[in-house]
Image: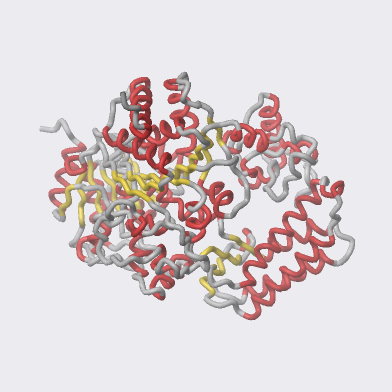
């Protein structure tokens, strides 16, 4: 009798365990979920990268968790949002382990791992580090000191009960309060030198991760570990990147540095207590020079480093280096928490100033305007591209599964694949036809030829084979949703919403009797629309972002269907409101990046200079992703019905409109306002004669 084919046997086992898990959880088999689970198992076995688009409702979490539990080596699951991380750890994984954890070939162990500053620090809590306010002695009720003491009591309770000490589990607090009970990785004394190292929440989390089959973390920590090369996660060879449409943005954020005169001054004050010479005073003087140079500049991107700013950065860099060198280097001195924190702060100032002063072609530098109360003008630096480091340091070392409900932009995987460092010619199966205006030639990620790296690397010459798979959605978008293209409206202007757009919004909201999520390009537009709807439709409840915390606004929106919620970017991607609560999604304009956005404009120019189409590959891709995410707020279950109304006529008239529409769910499209209003009226009054 012939031996069983190992890949076939593995596929059978994945199907079997998945079916058992779905049955135990009271669900039904979904073909897309099975197809995705098999593809993930194949990718892990063949060490081949995978991009898999799985629409809302597919059950993609189980589809990658089951093959990950069956994989022989540790798998890292990286998410973009805390909401998904909580869903995995608090709901999906416990239920999955309970369902299938008894099998000999299933390792049910899992752990959560975050950056060190996400955990309370027992050393800082128990022995303290002098801060800018001094020792907490007088603590009247409601003061910062009282809040810090309450947070310390919570942390001690966590230590006693063997809790995690994670910030997400702490009582409500501000960033300022949390800084008084936590430290950064630089400030940490280290387990060996800390008297509380054996109890350390962060170290215990690392220990749990080292003993687990699955490690759930976030995109930022993955970037620090894999891309920046700073060991943060126990050894692993496979990564599943969920919410992968966000990964480029999150890795960019993790690699962005900021510097201001106030931050340099603060570091100088901390160092003053730990150096005997004038080094701290010199650093404070350099802070003044930096402040003067920044004040003389207008906000925006700096295409070249101005002489005065360059000189100031060199002063800061050299003074910081001297200050670090003047601090005691013996181990006993480093065990002083105040000195360790001061040294870490000054070292960070040095690192940032050194990077900014280098004025690298691979970086984008800009001056950011901030309120004086928040520290005044700020200098920022971010990588021009991240696809090169991702290719060289993540894809070359690990097997990566990228998954999201939104990976196919313009109808194919090209835009997302190239943004993370994969080349179209490396795709194992024939690629789809490129979308409108996207180059069909074999251009490497970022719009450059494979060996012409915009970020200075070698282009990752080792081939990185990958597959792209769209497992579809359980939703029938053609019957459940209408895409309304308001072609008759005037193009959006710089002055915000005009009377025609406000009339359209009011008519649509009136027909829907509330039940509206408004996604706007600016806070001003959202507030203007909210004011108009409140004035003309006072019988409805209209909420605007900023009226309360987002969680509270979401609760009110869900509780009363005759409610509208208008807001900006955080609503485009972070709100899940199934049912009759949301039957109308209004998008005021195509969400192109602002022309003065320093990083996006620099990336667009770099693609143009490399011979690509910067507008399509940067601006239109950015807009397509947000449009797809925003439209995805409407249909969350098989029972949902509604309308996505885009009030920007360019979606119907511009040449790039085809690319954008191809990025959206396949809704039934119309330009007839009367048809749309009638549909909304029927949804709002289903039992009317």
Residue furthest to the right in view is 276
Q: Residue at x 32, y 57 (%)?
A: 624
Residue furthest to the bottom in view is 307
Q: Quarter of the image for the C terminus: give it.
A: top left
Does 313 sit above or below residue 256? below
In the rendered image, is residue 620 in sight?
Answer: yes
Q: Quadrant of residue 22?
A: top left
In the rendered image, is residue 560 in sight?
Answer: no
- Residue 599 lies, in percent from the top left, at 48, 66
Q: Quarter of the image for the N terminus: give it.
A: top left
Q: Which residue is drawn at 26% across and 60% down?
A: 435
Q: Is residue 142 left or right of residue 516?
A: right
- Residue 603 lies, in percent from the top left, at 44, 67
- Residue 109 lies, in percent from the top left, at 53, 28
Q: Residue at x 89, y 61 (%)?
A: 276
Q: Is residue 2 left or right of residue 137?
A: left
Front in this rendered view, residue 216 or 103: 103
Q: Residue at x 28, y 57 (%)?
A: 410
Does 254 sit above or below residue 171? below
């Amino acid at each position: 009798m012939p031996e069983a084919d190992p890949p076939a046997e593995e596929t059978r086992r994945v199907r079997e365990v998945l079916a058992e898990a779905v049955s135990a959880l009271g669900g039904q088999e979904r073909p897309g979920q099975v197809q995705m689970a098999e593809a993930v198992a194949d990718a892990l076995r063949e060490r081949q990268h995978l991009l898999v688009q799985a629409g809302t409702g597919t059950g993609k979490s189980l589809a990658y968790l089951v093959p990950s539990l069956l994989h022989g080596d540790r798998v890292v699951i990286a998410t973009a949002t805390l909401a998904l991380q909580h869903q995995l750890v608090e709901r999906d994984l416990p239920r999955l382990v309970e369902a299938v954890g008894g099998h000999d070939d299933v390792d049910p162990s899992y752990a959560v791992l975050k950056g060190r500053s996400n955990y309370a620090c027992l050393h800082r809590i128990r022995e303290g580090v002098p801060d800018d306010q001094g020792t907490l002695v007088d603590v009247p009720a409601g003061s910062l000191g009282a809040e810090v003491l309450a947070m310390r009591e919570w942390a001690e309770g966590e230590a006693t009960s063997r809790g995690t000490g994670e910030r997400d589990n702490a009582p409500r607090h501000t960033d300022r309060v949390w800084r008084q009970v936590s430290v950064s990785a630089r400030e940490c004394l280290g387990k060996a030198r800390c008297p509380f190292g054996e109890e350390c929440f962060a170290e215990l989390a690392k220990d749990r991760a080292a003993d687990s089959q699955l490690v759930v973390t976030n995109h930022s920590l993955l970037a620090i570990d894999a891309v920046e090369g700073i060991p943060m996660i126990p050894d692993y060879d496979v990564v599943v990147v969920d919410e992968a449409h966000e990964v480029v943005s999150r890795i960019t954020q993790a690699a962005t540095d900021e510097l201001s005169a106030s931050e340099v001054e603060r570091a100088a004050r901390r160092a003053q207590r730990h150096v005997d010479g004038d080094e701290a005073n010199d650093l404070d003087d350099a802070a003044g020079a930096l402040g003067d140079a920044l004040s003389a500049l207008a906000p925006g991107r700096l295409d070249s480093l101005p002489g005065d700013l360059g000189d100031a950065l060199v002063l800061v860099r050299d003074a910081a280096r001297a200050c670090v060198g003047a601090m005691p280097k013996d181990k006993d001195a480093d065990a002083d928490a105040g000195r360790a924190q001061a040294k870490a702060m000054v070292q960070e100032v040095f690192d940032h100033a050194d990077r900014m002063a280098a004025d690298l072609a691979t970086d984008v530098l800009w001056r950011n305007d901030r309120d004086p109360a928040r520290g005044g003008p700020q200098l920022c630096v971010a990588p021009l591209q991240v696809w090169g480091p991702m290719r060289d340091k993540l894809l070359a070392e690990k097997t990566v599964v990228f998954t999201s409900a939104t990976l196919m932009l313009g109808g194919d995987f090209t835009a997302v694949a190239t943004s993370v460092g994969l080349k179209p010619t490396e795709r194992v199966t024939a690629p789809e036809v490129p979308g409108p205006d996207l180059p069909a030639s074999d251009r490497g990620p970022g719009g450059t030829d494979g060996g012409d790296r915009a970020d200075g690397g070698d282009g990752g010459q080792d081939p990185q084979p990958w597959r792209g798979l769209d497992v579809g959605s359980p939703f029938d978008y053609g019957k459940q949703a209408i895409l309304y293209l308001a072609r008759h409206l005037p193009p959006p202007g710089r002055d915000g919403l005009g009377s025609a757009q406000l009339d359209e919004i009011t008519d649509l909201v009136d027909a829907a009797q509330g039940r509206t999520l408004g996604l706007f390009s600016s806070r001003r537009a959202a507030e203007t629309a909210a004011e108009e709807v409140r004035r003309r439709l006072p019988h409805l409840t209209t909420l605007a972002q900023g009226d309360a915390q987002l969680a509270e606004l979401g609760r009110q929106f869900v509780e009363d269907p005759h409610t509208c919620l208008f807001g900006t970017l955080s609503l485009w991607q972070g709100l899940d409101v199934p049912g009759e609560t949301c039957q109308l999604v209004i998008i005021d304009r195509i969400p192109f990046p602002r022309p003065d956005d320093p990083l996006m404009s620099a990336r667009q120019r770099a693609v143009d200079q490399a011979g690509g189409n910067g507008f399509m590959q940067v601006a239109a891709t950015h807009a397509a992703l947000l449009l797809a995410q925003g439209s995805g707020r409407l249909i969350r279950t098989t029972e949902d019905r509604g309308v996505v109304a885009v009030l920007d006529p360019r979606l119907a008239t511009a040449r790039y409109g085809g690319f954008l529409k191809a990025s959206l769910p396949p809704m039934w499209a119309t330009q007839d306002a009367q048809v749309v209003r009638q549909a909304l009226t029927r949804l709002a009054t289903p039992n009317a004669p």
